[in-house]
Image (tube, coloured by chain):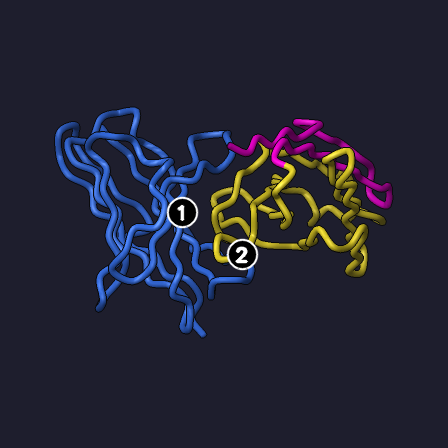
Chain colours: A blue, B yellow
């Protein structure tokens, strides 16, 4: 079991560009969660998805951010028109449902 | 929504001493409380968790206690070692199918001096 896989590990974008972050959950896990961690801060919940459904997006900024988990392929967190304040580590976690969540290695986004 | 407060923000101990980190939560419906260890530049790793139907759980040098009435839970690390140095996060959630929707504390930077 390869664990939760995220890519890329590091991503540099210029202000105004788009960032796409990918997450493949652990085998057998159908629940995916995205978190953001600002430097020297805790993790903040962003969105919870199951296949083809957004279950809870209460932590997502209202603009520029979107997430999906298609029937086939990884979950994607998309940030349009990035700004410097979007620079952070973005972690994906997966769970089988009623069970603990396991985190991926994260994607470190730097906006220059 | 849920709010989790964690103390202390930094903790420095000598190797072999015990370390205790405390958290309080606000939502009485929360029933699952995991603890994560995060080393610099790495992923949060689950080290122990507790569900609301028990008051204490132990795994070798690590133990967690839960007081549902007071809405607080604590992490205890005994016989600390330098490799225990990391940031520790407590979290809480309502459980059910949302075990992954966690509210995290602010983190505790634990430093264990040889």
Mark sitting on residue A91: 1
Outermost residue toward the front in this view: B29
Locate residue B96, reporting x and y percent. Answer: 54, 56
In the depicted view, which residue is nearer to us: A50 or B63?
A50
Q: Which residues are magenta?
A: B1-27
Judge from the rendering whether residue A9 lies leftward or rightward of residue B8; answer left or right. Answer: left
Q: Secondary structure at mark 1?
A: strand
Q: Chain of mark 1?
A: A
Measured as percent of width and height from the top left, residue A76 is found at 25, 52
- Total numbered labels placed on residues in the image: 2
Element assignment for label 2: helix
Between B63 and B13, the one lying in front of the other is B63
Neighbours of disc 1 within 10 Å: few (<14), some (14-19), many (20+): many
Residue at the image position 22 percent from the left and 61 percent from the top: A70
Left or right of B98? Residue B114 is right
Is residue B43 in the magenta section? no
Classify the position of the C terminus of chain B by image quarter. Answer: top right
Label 2 marks a residue whose chain is B
**What residue sits right under mark 2 in the picture?**
B96
């Amino acid at each position: 079991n390869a664990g939760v896989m995220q890519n890329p590990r590091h991503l540099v974008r210029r202000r105004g560009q788009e960032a796409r972050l990918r997450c493949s959950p652990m085998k057998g896990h159908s629940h995916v969660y995205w978190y953001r961690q600002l430097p020297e801060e805790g993790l903040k919940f962003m969105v919870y998805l199951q296949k083809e459904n957004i279950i809870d997006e209460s932590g997502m900024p209202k603009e520029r951010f979107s997430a999906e988990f298609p029937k086939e392929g990884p979950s994607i967190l998309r940030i349009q028109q990035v700004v410097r304040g979007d620079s952070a580590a973005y972690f994906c976690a997966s769970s089988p449902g009623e069970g603990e969540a396991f985190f991926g290695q994260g994607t470190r986004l730097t906006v220059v | 929504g849920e709010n989790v407060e964690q103390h202390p923000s930094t903790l420095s101990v000598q190797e072999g001493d015990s370390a205790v980190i405390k958290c309080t939560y606000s939502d009485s419906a929360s029933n699952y409380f995991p603890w994560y260890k995060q080393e610099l530049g790495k992923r949060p790793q689950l080290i122990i968790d507790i569900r609301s139907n028990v008051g204490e759980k132990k795994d070798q040098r690590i133990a967690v206690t839960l007081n549902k009435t007071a809405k607080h839970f604590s992490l205890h690390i005994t016989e600390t070692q330098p490799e225990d140095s990391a940031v520790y996060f407590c979290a809480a959630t309502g459980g059910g199918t949302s075990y992954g929707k966690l509210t995290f504390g602010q983190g505790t930077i634990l430093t264990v001096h040889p």
